[in-house]
């Protein structure tokens, strides 16, 4: 098998996945009609899953168990409280919503709303899946060389490499894809 036929850095792979927690509860998934396309080697997936997909080919099925250290890490720090008035006027304030905020060090980081009580909103910079072992069932459906634009942008532009299709998942947050993509171009697959 040649290197052009396996998942490796600089390749765009199309996958169908189901992510569950340790009890089998589905946390996120793609659909067969809308697989997730990602650029391998560019931190579009959690490190533990990306590592287990390296070297796979179209048609392979992968059962991947990813410990917190190779997923969304261990929880660090504590949740913080903000006044509702500190959010933009047009912001949808609800538990689970994700916002990008600037730190004192002028870094932009994601935070998630974890609790709302009256005018007090509790936010947490830890990913909702921090401290969790992630269980993936993945089918490799598609593989191609990345385009120059994709390599420059650091993420897939979909099956054909045009536009900015970032897949289609159950939860709308990202994604973070996510985690680790440009803040204004997060994928729908934060957990992957």
Image (tube, rainbow, N blue to C red):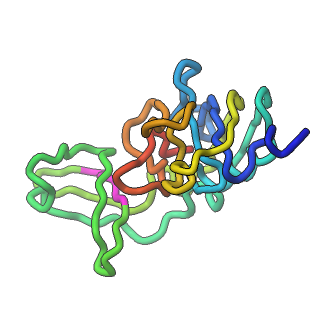
Q: In which quarter of the image is the C terminus?
A: top right
Q: Is residue 83 above or below residue 155?
A: below
Q: Residue at x 43, y 37 (%)?
A: 163
**Is residue 75 left or right of 55 when viewed as pictured?**
left
Q: Residue at x 49, y 57 (%)?
A: 180
Spot occupied by residue 73 in the image (x, y as percentages of width and height):
57, 61
**Is residue 170 left or right of 73 when viewed as pictured?**
left
Q: In this view, does 56 lie above or below 132?
A: above
Specify the farthest residue to the top. Answer: 33
Answer yes or no: is residue 33 visible: yes
Specify the farthest residue to the right. Answer: 1
User: In the depicted view, which residue is nearer to us: 22 or 87?
Assistant: 87
The magenta stretch spans which residues?
110-115
Spot occupied by residue 59 in the image (x, y as percentages of width and height):
78, 26
Specify the farthest residue to the front. Answer: 148
Q: Is the magenta stretch mostly helix, strand or loop?
A: strand
User: In the depicted view, which residue is nearer to us: 68 or 59?
Assistant: 59
| Image quadrant where residue 68 sits | bottom right
Residue 114 lies within the magenta run: yes
Q: Quadrant of the N terminus?
A: top right
Residue 107 lies within the magenta run: no
Q: Is residue 105 above or below residue 151?
A: below
Spot occupied by residue 134 in the image (x, y as percentages of width and height):
62, 45
Spot occupied by residue 51 in the image (x, y as percentages of width and height):
73, 52
**Is residue 48 left or right of 150 when viewed as pictured?**
right
Q: Residue at x 36, y 59 (%)?
A: 110
């Amino acid at each position: 098998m040649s290197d052009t036929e396996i998942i490796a850095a600089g390749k765009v792979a199309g996958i169908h996945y189901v992510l569950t927690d340790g009890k089998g509860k589905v946390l996120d998934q793609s659909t067969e009609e809308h697989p997730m396309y990602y650029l391998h080697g560019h931190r579009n997936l959690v490190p533990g899953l990306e590592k287990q997909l390296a070297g796979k080919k179209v048609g392979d099925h992968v059962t991947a168990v990813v410990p917190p250290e190779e997923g969304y890490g261990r929880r660090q720090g504590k949740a913080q409280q903000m006044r509702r008035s500190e959010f933009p006027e047009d912001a949808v304030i609800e538990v689970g919503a994700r916002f990008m905020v600037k730190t004192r060090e002028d870094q932009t980081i994601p935070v998630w709303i974890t609790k709302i009580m009256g005018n007090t909103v509790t936010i947490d910079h830890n990913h909702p899946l921090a401290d969790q072992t992630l269980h993936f069932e993945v089918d490799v459906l598609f593989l191609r060389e990345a385009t120059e634009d994709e390599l420059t942008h650091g993420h897939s532009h979909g099956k054909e490499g045009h536009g900015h299709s970032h897949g289609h998942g159950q939860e709308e947050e990202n994604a973070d894809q996510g985690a680790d993509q440009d803040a204004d171009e997060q994928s729908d697959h934060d957990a992957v």
